[in-house]
Image (cartoon, rainbow, N blue to C red):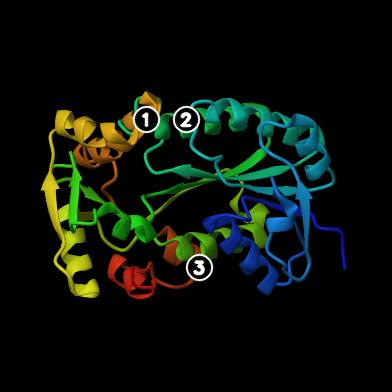
Amino acid sequence: MAEPTVVVTGATGRLGGRVARRLAEREVPQRLLVRSPERAPQLPGATPVRGSYDDHDAVVSGLSGAETVFMVSASESADRLAQHKVFVDAAVEAGVRHLVYVSFFGAAPDATFTLARDHFHTEEHIRATGLAYTFLRDNIYADFVPDLAGADGVIRGPAGQGRAAFVAQDDIADASAAILARPADHAGATYDLTGPASLSLDEAAAVLSEVRGRTVTYHPETVEEAYASRASYGAPQWQLDAWVSTYTAIAAGELDGVSDAIARLTGHPATSVADVVRGMPPR
């Protein structure tokens, strides 16, 4: 089999694992850059290699000889942007030609969602390298909608009556695999990846109620209430800010808006939240 020229990061995670499986189904040889190779999925044509984003030397070694890299954003942390910069610079040193980066919908330096600012600055760092790039600006994962509700069946957050165009991880993976199979066709492109409709959290609660057969409701908190209700988790301030600003970004209208990119890239319509939830095991 030919030496892999595609590297997938995050293959032990939900999105990277989905992308790796789709490339294997397409018989695309790939390398899986992961922190723990023993946890990497066992896939035909896939070779796991060890490397974490902040380990420059391991990344250079792991990416050497690769032309295209699928870069899932690092785990949320206070220094995630710094990790991204180390990884991108190492990719340049390794001779990578094209980065396909999983960004976030509405990435901007002044985005309400704090982590969307990190995504913007990562995009800018990639642009500055001169590498070919493709940015996938995902909306909030539809797969996470059931997790918005607490054990009492209430979604709480300061989202007002704003809307989000929740997108299925399977759809993102389908789009990503299509891009990685023909990366040159997508060089310089930025795709907003969304579901087929923008939903308010009232509507998301109604979907969960219908599909799961239990009553789920939405309680719009104030910002102050949101911080207070999450204080017991003992999370650092940056994480509290990220959690709360997910909802305030919805309230600000920054996650509203439907794109046709999923359909254009995959050849099938985007999946609704209801269909995503129906396909998930009950919990």
Residue 91 x %, y %: 73, 36
Residue 118, disc: 2
Quarter of the picture containing the N terminus is bottom right
Q: Mark 3 highlights which residue?
A: 266
Q: Mark 1 highlights which residue?
A: 114
Above or below, 36 against 249 in this view is: below
**Type of residue at label 3?**
Thr
Above or below, 11 against 130 in this view is: below
- Residue found at x 70% / y 29%: 89
Q: Badge 3, how many Cα within 10 Å: few under 14, some, many 20+?
A: some
Helix, strand, or loop for circle 1? helix
Residue 34 x %, y %: 69, 48
Helix, strand, or loop for circle 2? helix
Quarter of the picture containing the C terminus is bottom left
Decide if residue 166 is in sight here: no
Q: Are marks 2 and 1 in contact (CB under 8 Å)?
A: yes
**Type of residue at label 1?**
Thr
Quadrant in the picture for residue 211: bottom left
- Point out the tag, 1 or 3, that comes first from the N-terminus: 1
Q: Badge 2, how many Cα within 10 Å: few under 14, some, many 20+?
A: many
Residue 215, disc: none
Residue in the foreground of this view, choosing between 97 and 147? 147
Residue 114 x %, y %: 37, 30
Is residue 53 shown left or right of residue 242? right
Above or below, 123 against 164 in this view is: above
Q: Nearer the viewer, mark 1 or mark 3?
A: 1
| C-alpha distance separating marks 1 and 3 | 30 Å
Residue 28 x %, y %: 73, 66
